[in-house]
């Protein structure tokens, strides 16, 4: 067994839908699920449907948040206020840290940067 799938199926080079197995390279012949066992492969495919939905929702929320953050910044600066409010950023960083630990802090830093730009 290898650790990583080199290719996950989808469309092949000619633009046609592949049969879900990696055509070339070290993972050639390995199913796109990473296992040849049918029950496991079916369960993985099922779970991936939900993972893809979650990823879409995360992307949509990410983009909505960034747009709102930009609007707050533009509104504040147009009224003579500051670009940033660091106390608010600390509050957000702490909320993410409390829920998700150190990764939460990193995630919140990326979220903040997506809206207000780099410090
Ligand atoms: O809440 C604000 O005041 C914002 O400007 C939004 C936001 C954020 O993305 O959450 C962005 C920049 C600020 O420094 C603080 C927070």
Image: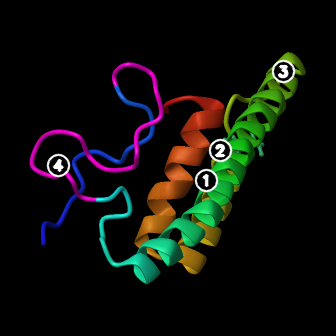
Q: Earlier in the sequence, mark 3 or mark 1?
A: 1
User: Which-is-in-front pick, marks 3 and 4?
Assistant: 4
Residue 115 image offset from top left, x and y in percent: 65, 35
Give left or right: position of 63 versus 97.
right
Disc 2 beta carbon < 8 A from ligand 1?
no
Labels 3 & 1 near each other (Cβ < 8 A) = no
| Image quadrant containing the N terminus | bottom left
Query: Rounded to the nearest whole Å, what is the CA distance between mark 3 and mark 4?
Result: 61 Å
What is the C-alpha distance between the residues marked 2 and 4? 31 Å
Q: Would you place residue 114 above or below residue 36 in this image?
A: above
Q: Which residue does the numbered mark 3 point to in the structure image?
A: 80
Question: Neighbour class for label 2 at 10 Å: few (<14), some, many (≥20)?
Answer: few
Locate residue 11: give its quadrant.
top left
Q: Position of residue 94 (x, y in %)?
A: 59, 69
Mark 3 in CB contact with mark 4 (< 8 angstroms): no
Percent position of residue 41, x then y: 43, 72
**Cα separation between marks 3 and 1:** 38 Å
Circle 4 sits on which residue? 28
Of 81 and 12, nearer the camera is 12
Secondary structure of the residue carrying numbered label 3: loop
- The region drawn magenta spans 13-30
Q: Secondary structure at mark 1?
A: helix
Residue, disc 1? 55
Residue identified by numbered label 2:
59
Query: Is tag 1's residue or tag 4's residue first in the polypeptide sequence?
Result: 4
CB contact under 8 Å: marks 1 and 2:
yes
Disc nearer the start of the sequence (2/4): 4
**How far separated are the C-alphas under marks 1 and 4?**
27 Å
At 81% from the left and 36% from the top, the residue drawn is 68
Whether the magenta-drawn stretch holds residue 27 is answered as yes
Sequence-wise first label, 3 or 2: 2
Q: CA distance from mark 1 to mark 2?
A: 6 Å
């Amino acid at each position: 067994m290898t650790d990583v799938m080199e290719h996950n199926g989808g469309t092949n080079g000619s633009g046609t839908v592949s049969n879900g197995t990696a055509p070339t390279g070290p993972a050639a012949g390995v199913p796109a699920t990473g296992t040849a066992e049918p029950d496991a492969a079916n369960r993985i495919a099922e779970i991936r449907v939900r993972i893809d939905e979650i990823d879409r929702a995360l992307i949509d929320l990410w983009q909505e948040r960034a747009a709102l953050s930009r609007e707050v910044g533009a509104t504040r600066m147009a009224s003579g206020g500051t670009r940033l409010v660091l106390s608010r950023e600390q509050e957000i960083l702490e909320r993410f840290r409390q829920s998700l630990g150190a990764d939460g802090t990193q995630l919140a830093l990326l979220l903040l940067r997506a809206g207000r730009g780099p410090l």
